[in-house]
Amino acid sequence: MSTSSAKRTTKKENRTQAPWHGRHCGSADVSLPCQCSATHYLRRLHARGNRKRTDRLAFFLGVKNLLAIRGDAQASMKYFQAEPEGHSNAIDLVKQINALNKGQYLDEEMLNSTPTDFCIGVAGYPEKHAESPNLQNDLQHLKAKVDAGAAYIVTQMFFDNQKYFDFVKRCRAVGITVPIIPGLKPVSVRSHLQKLPQTFHIDLPEALVKELQKCTHNKAVRQLGVEWAIAQSKELIAYDVPVIHYYTMGGRSDNILKIAEAVF
């Protein structure tokens, strides 16, 4: 099963020293997702009071990694809108967390503030963020987040490994040197044929589409998703990726466990 559309010419472009707390493929280290939006079950960072409490709570609980993402627009909104005193873009959240690492809190009257030690991650889009006008513009926004303090990148899901290989090359070409963690999502239901491209603005390889169309029930789709993700994972590890992130979604993770058992 081929999971990349073109032959690679190099393996080592993505190997850099991992700065986050959890340095090995298959590690179960945790990143706390911090969103600018209000559509996540974690305590939100978009309001001034919540931002202060969440950051401090995470620090004193021993959380080391924060994944700073803007989040999506709420279902009732066509476009993302920040809440009052909230962040409109992830880069502002990166700057806020980076300031905490320097002991600079939003509460300027706080005495004896303790600098945090968060390692900051951000999202990257091998196939371009839906709101970016082009790939180059998207890369400039990503580089700005890294320059603001991000120490690693986690990619949006992709199903053609060549998309990731090309993305890494483009990042390195514009001076982004931090580790780039590939994000994988195994297909699990037939409706993913339409929902994943529509929701996440990604392409599904024709080879995967043809195999999915042969599946007559979701159990077969789920098994195909596991097999495809295993093949992707093995090829990515051969490419020397720093670590692999798997998206579960929907509350079930049995397919992720099967992938991990086969790969690691």
Image (spheres, rainbow, N blue to C red):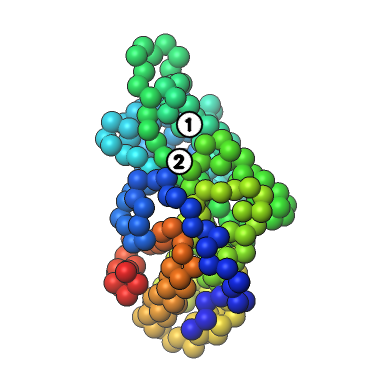
Under circle 1, the secondary element is helix
Query: Where in the figure is residue 30, as x and y percent of width and height?
Result: 33, 49
Under circle 2, the secondary element is strand
The mark nearer the N terminus, 1 or 2, is: 1
Query: Where in the figure is residue 12, as x and y percent of width and height?
Result: 52, 63
Question: How many numbered badges does the structure rendering display?
Answer: 2
The C terminus lies in quadrant:
bottom left
Q: Is residue 64 left or right of residue 17?
A: left
Could you tell me if residue 187 is visible in this image? Answer: no
> Residue farthest to the left?
61
Residue 120 is tagged as: 2
Q: Nearer the viewer, residue 199 or 150?
A: 150
Query: Where in the figure is residue 152, as x and y percent of width and height?
Result: 48, 47
Q: Is residue 258 left or right of residue 237?
A: left
Q: Nearer the viewer, residue 257 or 251?
A: 257
Q: Nearer the viewer, residue 63 or 191?
A: 63
The three-letter code of the residue at mark 2 reads Ile
Q: Quick one: label 2, few (<14), some, or many (20+) residues within 10 Å?
A: many
Spatial CA distance of label 1 from label 2 is: 8 Å
Considering only vertical position in the picture, is 264 above or below 52?
A: below
Do the residues under discs 1 and 2 have CB atoms within 8 angstroms?
yes
Q: Quick one: label 1, few (<14), some, or many (20+) residues within 10 Å?
A: many
The residue carrying mark 1 is: 98
The three-letter code of the residue at mark 1 reads Asn
Q: Nearer the viewer, residue 81 or 30?
A: 30
Q: Who's the residue at 46% across and 32% down the image?
A: 97
